[in-house]
Image: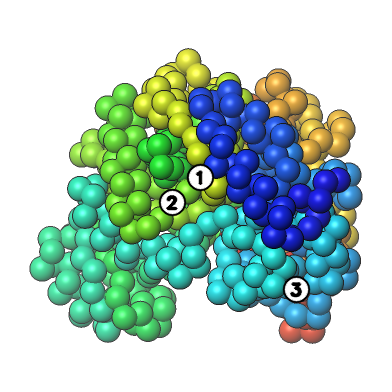
Amino acid sequence: MSNMTTTDNGSSKQAKAKKQAKKKLRGISEIRSYFYQNDEPIYFVSAACFNLLGMDDWVRKFHFINYIDCFDGIHPSVMIPSGKPEREFQSIEEINNYLLAHPEVKEFVKKHGKGKAAFLFFDEESEKLCQDLGLEIAFPSAKLRQKIDNKIMTTKIGNEAGVPSVPNALAKVASYKDLVRLAKDHDLGDELVVQTAFGDSGHTTFFIANEDEYKEHAEEIEKESEVKVMRRIRCRGAALEACVTRAGTVVGPLMTELVGFKELTPYKGGWCGNEVFAGAFSPAARDYARASTLDVGKALKERGYRGYFEVDYLLDLDRDKVYLGELNPRITGASSMTNLAAFAHADAPLFLFHLLEWSGMDFEFDVDALNARWANFDNIDSWSQMVIKYTEKDVQYITAAPKSGVWQINDGGIAQFLRPQTHRRTVQVSDRAFFLRIAKEGDYFYEGADLGILVMPGRAMDDEFRLTDMAKSWINAIRAQYAAQSIDPAKVAVHPGAKSGGFKML
């Protein structure tokens, strides 16, 4: 291993700076080659490797530093520090800060070299810990990301960019009378959706049509200084990931979202998966979403943001309109779908352009031509992923769990484990799927706990956007691989890391 990756002396930094100053990457081929030969370690620090699964195939010296060992030690790029703290994590940021401060992680970075760190979520403490480790965070500051990453700011950014949200009002709500008055003043109707600024997987999205439904969530709504009150529409959800670079904004395909399926999630408005399916939306809807994402990218760039982001859209099925839903200035639960799709393998994964923007290298590529290729029907292969959560309200101790890898399902709905595998590209037939285990033996079932992610070729929903019989069979077959013992939740401390806000993998 060269001194360039293991030391931090002035001469090595100067040599690297001179090399980058002389070299300009031109076109996708040279960009790919640059990362195949990458000599600067890149560490993805997160609860699990899910979001950027497969990125180590594209980037030399890409390492996963995780809390959860999804692969039982067989993944060559995953590092899991030993031991578990006697605490219950409340957020993914707390998990990441625990990892960054762990002595074994410090030794791992010392051995493999100082470089860059990537996260799903991080905060100012993460920034300080990375500074102590000599790592540069390859994202805009936590302060900027947090300022953008909330539902209220999404609406404001969308309005500035000319990308409207569902008819709404932003205001303080102190009572049900306030809510009714606000809805009347803004012609929002009697059936409403109320969202607080922060929250994930439907935890802070409330559907309210009467005072009793309001009372269920009154405390959460009234404690906020401002909430978003929307007209309830009959809609279909979509997600689109993109990346702001100095060459322009690169835009991925429009993906359908799985939302609120009781077989997958206990949360009525909860995200529980995605489909990459070119025929899910009309050409006009896809074109509008792509153009709107480019406008959002410009608005983010004006705020100093650069790199990866995701936009949720809502297609109003009764009015044939597309509205802005949410904006996430980060990688998301859909990122593994975007980065492992056929179009990504033909050019480069979207996250590679994020790393390129933060590489310090000079580069140029035809962003318009790239976006045109990625918008082409013929370049989009059909895949689905389902995030399987525990949907009951009890607490159970897990005594057996399925392995990560390739599974096969028979006509009777029984799943059989075929082989270990570290990502889904080897799954090619309709009766096979890739399962990434999150909850394992020794963890706990509790309401909303992530059991794992199932990825399969083809669709998980039919033309009416209901779960297919095959999708339901797979959900039942995977659940059947788990065994657990009922316990009294009052008599047990939840296993540290088992309960952490759902790990916020979205």
Which amino acid lies under the numbered mark 2 shown in the image of this protein? Arg
Q: Tell me if mark 3 has few (under 14), some (14-19) or many (20+) residues whose alpha carbon lies within 10 angstroms of its own.
A: some
**In this view of the protein, which residue sits in the foreground, 155 or 360?**
360
Identify the residue under disc 1: 357
Relative placement, left or right, of 240 versus 295 is right
Q: Tell me if mark 2 has few (under 14), some (14-19) or many (20+) residues whose alpha carbon lies within 10 angstroms of its own.
A: many
Identify the residue under disc 3: 101
Secondary element at tag 2: loop
Which amino acid lies under the numbered mark 3 shown in the image of this protein? Ala
The quadrant in which residue 497 appears is: bottom right
Q: Which residue lies at the image location 67% right of the left edge and 54% below the top edge?
A: 13
Q: Which of the numbered marks, if any, corresponds to residue 306?
A: 2
Nearest to N terminus: mark 1 or mark 2: 2
Nearest to N terminus: mark 3 or mark 1: 3
Q: Using the numbered discs, state the Cα–Cα distance from disc 2 to disc 3 in whole angstroms.
A: 27 Å
Question: Disc 1 vs disc 2: Cβ atoms closer than 8 Å?
Answer: yes
